[in-house]
Image: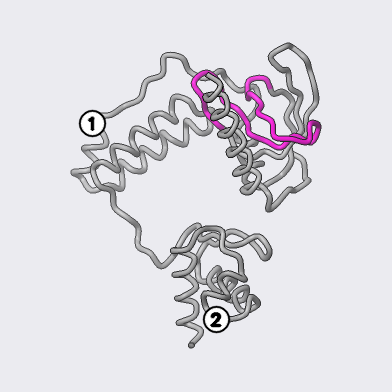
Amino acid sequence: MSRTARLFQLMQALRSGPSPRTSVQLAQDLGVSPRTVHRDIDALRGLGAVIDGEAGFGFTLIEDATLPPLGFTNDELEALVLGLREVQLIGDPALSNAASEALRKLQGRLPQRQSHRLSHAVLTAKRFNRPAIPTIDVADLRQAAWDERMVEFAYTDANGADTRRRVNPLGIVYMDRSSVLLSWCHLRRDFRVFRLDRMQEMDVTEESFRPKRIPLLREAIARLRAEREAQDQET
């Protein structure tokens, strides 16, 4: 098999298989060694493909430079408008501004017929009770989660008790009346949820927990889902 054909097959395997795919799994699919897969991953990255992951933890295709940009159906466009308008209402200031800018960019780049549809979309979003305003810079927290860097902050719980926490930030959930951080707490040695409006004095550390965020986030969500199902059964 030529190298070009092998790179093409590797891209197909990354597109179609469940993510993340380990080098061993990809090597078995392609009939090559894991070392060859690692070299080919580096080659694809050099050609413009955005592939997340590293040896031992698997690889995920984030952006495929060979695929053309997609257009939008009318329903897809309505869904985008509705989602972005919801973010304008519930997001932190940086995220809300980003949603507004994204709408403006869509407006300028869509065909005229769809640009008119965006301006006069049937759907919109309203919130009469917006989530409590965060007391930290949520943009910094989001970036720390993406960079997989631990954060420290002061926290006041529902009973008024003050503690200092050091956590792995996993994800942020925007709920009806508050926005919360899903995290692994080093003080409690377990998953914990923290309201953003009760966090103070947050510092982003230089300590990394890469590449554990995605598996930890999946475990945290599964734990929350199991707890909710158990509560539903009790009622």
In the picture provided, is 68 more to the left or to the right than 138?
A: left
The residue type indicated by label 1 comes to: His
For the point 54% across and 28% down, which residue is it? 92
In the picture provided, is 70 more to the left or to the right than 227?
A: left
In the picture provided, is 100 more to the left or to the right than 60?
A: left
The image quadrant of residue 124 is top left
User: 225 or 174: which is nearer to us?
Assistant: 225
Q: Residue furthest left?
A: 113
User: 226 or 167: which is nearer to us?
Assistant: 226
In front of the other: label 2 or label 1? Answer: 2
Query: In the rendering, at what x and y percent does residue 234 appear?
Result: 56, 21
Up the image or down, 83 lies above or below 175; here it is: below
User: 166 or 49: which is nearer to us?
Assistant: 166
For the point 79% across and 31% down, which residue is it? 188
For the point 73% across and 30% down, which residue is it? 202
Name the disc covering residue 120, or none. Answer: 1
- Per the image, label 1 sits on a secondary structure element best described as loop
User: 25 or 141: which is nearer to us?
Assistant: 25
For the point 32% across and 55% down, which residue is it? 70
Name the disc covering residue 31, or none. Answer: 2
How busy is the neighbourhood of tag 1: few (under 14 within 10 Å), some, or many (20 plus)? few
The residue type indicated by label 2 comes to: Gly
Q: Which residues are magenta?
A: 173-198
Give the mark nearer the N terminus: 2 vs 1: 2
Query: In the rendering, at what x and y percent does residue 235 appear?
Result: 52, 18
Query: In the rendering, at what x and y percent does residue 114 appear?
Result: 22, 43
Query: In the rendering, at what x and y percent does residue 155 appear?
Result: 74, 22
- Per the image, label 2 sits on a secondary structure element best described as loop
Residue 185 within the segment the image draws in magenta: yes
The image quadrant of residue 82 is top left
